[in-house]
Image (tube, helix red, strand yellow):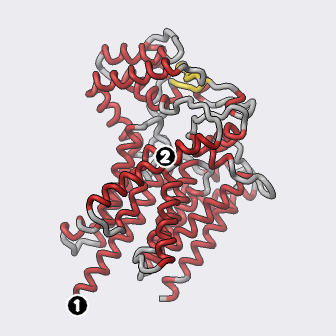
Amino acid sequence: MKKIHHYPQLAIVCLSLATLIFSWDGSYEGGDIAAARRSYLGENPIDIWGAFSGFFYGNLPDTLLPWGLWLLIIQISVTSTGLVLVFRSIKINNASDTFAFFTLAYVILSFTGYLTRDSTLTSLYIFGVGLIFRSIKLINYLDYVYFYSGILLIVLAMAFRPWLGFAAILPILYLSKSRLKIIFLSFSLIVLPFSLDRISYLSNDFNSVHPEFQVIISDLSSMTCLSSNQVTRERGTFILNEFGNTSYSMSEICNDYRINTWQSVGRWSVKSSELGSNTGLDGIQSMSKIQISSDLTDSKVGKIRNAWINYVFDHPKDYIQIKLVHATQIGFAGDTWGLRILAAENLMDHISGLFFIPFDLLISFHLLSPIMTLLFGFLIIYIKLNKFSLASVVKNREIVFAFLFLLIWLFLSSIAYIGDNGRYTYFSSFIFYIFILRGTYNLKNSSELKNLS
């Protein structure tokens, strides 16, 4: 029993140290989080990446170690702590499941070795889940401290993507309250990430540039370029031109259109002072035709937003069709491919590349995508619970939560679609597997206790 329960915990700690060492390559000044930090610390901060992201990354220390390394240390540390707590709570009692959990830990740690908002979100959420599992019985003061600390971490995690705030309701699975109180608590937990993001505006004088316009341009360009309805296409073209009072034709817009990113059509037009540096927003969007200016007036913003809402309600069939296309892109984790070892330039790069080969292969073959996760989930339940009735499986709250969590995450990500980057959905797969594993063990354990009694 000692080998099963103690060695894997030590292995997770060792794995986290290896991930920390091999993830750090010193390139932390690129990407969204670095831009959010620079903007927050600059003269005229903007909220392209959300106010809470700017506040969080902008307040990371930059002394003794680079702020990017501090972030990496925080992410890996809290993730490994959360994984150890999760492992202890599940009480795995065989070698094959221990290996499966260790593999899952490797994948999660590899992902939290990225310097992205989704990785930060994942690390905080996993830690929160671990604390809640640790406090599951709520029988003493310390349990309550763990439980409410877990809630706080989960709310903090979801503040990075507040439109997915439904994920903050996880703690209600472990509360014995009346139905009315559960509904109230659920609503409160969903609203808290939004509230935290709004409160973050008080920390700095943010200029709102309306990041939701990314979704609007994604919807408009997809309906314009994919719909078979000529009226839908012409109206979409007209609204897109409203952003910058341009006169691009439908063919000019659709010649650039690519389904895997909104940036093929749209781009931000912001000042260097708003980015906190002389560096612009590079990449494909520098050549995109429809620009979102940070100087849009309130009346212009309202006009475009209302035009988009009316457009969607007037063309529901086309909207649903393009959302199904978006869901498919996200469901298979879209355009994800690459092995880090192929780009290795020195010995350390080669060693790191070897360490991450299993993870890189998983994402390259889309095995962490929501569709594949659902498939593997059904397979796990069939193998592990084939002797249980369907009713007993459906009554297990953790198994049901796992499936609902993944499906709702996929649904909301499709509604807010701006691209098919796999990192938008990997987190939902991690939570799915943790709750499937915990649910199957709890179901088996409760069945064994009934048989003994």
- Which of the two discs, 1 and 2, labels the residue nearer the N terminus? 2
Mark 2 belongs to which amino acid? Answer: Ser
Mark in front: 1 vs 2: 2
Mark 1 belongs to which amino acid? Answer: Ser
Residue position for label 2: 195
| Residue 145 on image: x %, y % | 51, 71
| Residue 202 on image: x %, y % | 60, 41
Relative to residue 23, is residue 64 drawn left or right? Answer: right
- Is residue 25 something that shows in the picture? no
Above or below, 342 relative to 128: above
Above or below, 155 relative to 325: below
Quadrant assignment, res 401: bottom left
Residue position for label 1: 453
Quadrant assignment, res 171: bottom left
Instruction: Measure how far apart labels 1 and 2 are at the Cα level.
Output: 48 Å
| Residue 150 on image: x %, y % | 49, 65
Give the structural element (helix, strand or loop) at label 2.
helix
Quadrant assignment, res 51: top right
Residue 173 has which mark?
none
The outermost residue toward the bottom is 452
- Is residue 395 something that shows in the picture? yes
Give the class, few, some or many, for how many residues have Cα within 10 Å of label 2's Cα (few <14, many ≥20).
Answer: some
Residue drawn where x is 47% and y is 15% of the image: 242
